[in-house]
Amino acid sequence: MLSRRRISAALIGLLVLVIGGWLVQEVVAVNDPAEHRGSLPGAGSGLEVVPLSSLPEEVDQTWRLIERGGPFPYPDRDGTVFGNREKLLPEKPSGYYREYTVPTPGSADRGPRRLVTGEERELYYTGDHYASFVVVDPRR
């Protein structure tokens, strides 16, 4: 009888360890952008990688417009070449990057927020008009 209890306790303990390890792995995978370095375009840039779901709702709306090909709120400006004059994104030939307006609630003009795409499906976000960027992971 005592050995059955020990075996049962050992099996329960093992099950708890396996489930606990799986949960820890999932949490680390969600919070560790290094996991995506090989598969997420732009992740090798050295910029912070953030999930699309963690950014303002308007970023997701703009991303959906980009994926659909528009229509964009500023058709004369959205989809135009982003020159990367600040040199915060990886250096690429002229015309490589395109920029899109992310609406800023309460702003009378285009506001400071933009999504910038690269020819290799990179996706960058700036909320401060090109003073800083993050790599956006649209899968999360």
Image (spheres, helix red, strand yellow):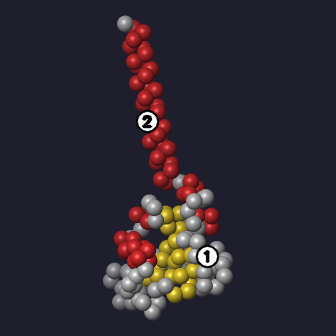
Which residue is more in the foreground, 92 or 87?
92
Q: Residue 16: x percent and y percent? A: 42, 31
Q: Residue 6: x percent and y percent? A: 42, 14
Q: For the residue carrying disc 1, how many other residues have a C-alpha within 10 Å: few (<14), some (14-19), or many (20+)?
A: some
When asked about the image quadrant of residue 64, the answer is bottom left
Asked if residue 20 shows in the view, the reply is: yes
Toward the bottom, the furthest residue is: 76
Toward the top, the furthest residue is: 1
Dot 2 falls on a residue whose secondary structure is helix
Q: Residue 54: x percent and y percent? A: 41, 64
Q: Amino acid at mark 2?
A: Ile
Asked if residue 102 shows in the view, the reply is: no
When asked about the image quadrant of residue 48, the answer is bottom right
Residue position marked by numbered label 1 in the rendering:
88
Q: CA distance from mark 2 to mark 1?
A: 41 Å
> Which residue shows up at 40% across the image and 18% down it?
8
Q: For the residue carrying disc 2, how many other residues have a C-alpha within 10 Å: few (<14), some (14-19), or many (20+)?
A: few
| Left or right, residue 14 beside residue 86 | left
Dot 1 falls on a residue whose secondary structure is loop
Residue depth check, mark 2 versus mark 1: number of the one nearer the observer: 2
Q: Amino acid at mark 1?
A: Leu
> Which residue shows up at 62% across the image and 67% down it?
45
Residue position marked by numbered label 2 in the rendering:
19
Label pair 2/1, CB-CB below 8 angstroms = no
> Which residue shows up at 50% across the image and 50% down it?
29
Q: Residue 56: x percent and y percent? A: 38, 70
Quadrant for the C terminus in the image? bottom left
Q: Is residue 5 above or below residue 121?
A: above
> Which residue shows up at 41% across the image and 89% down it?
74
| Left or right, residue 122 beside residue 57 | right
Q: Is residue 57 above or below residue 17?
A: below
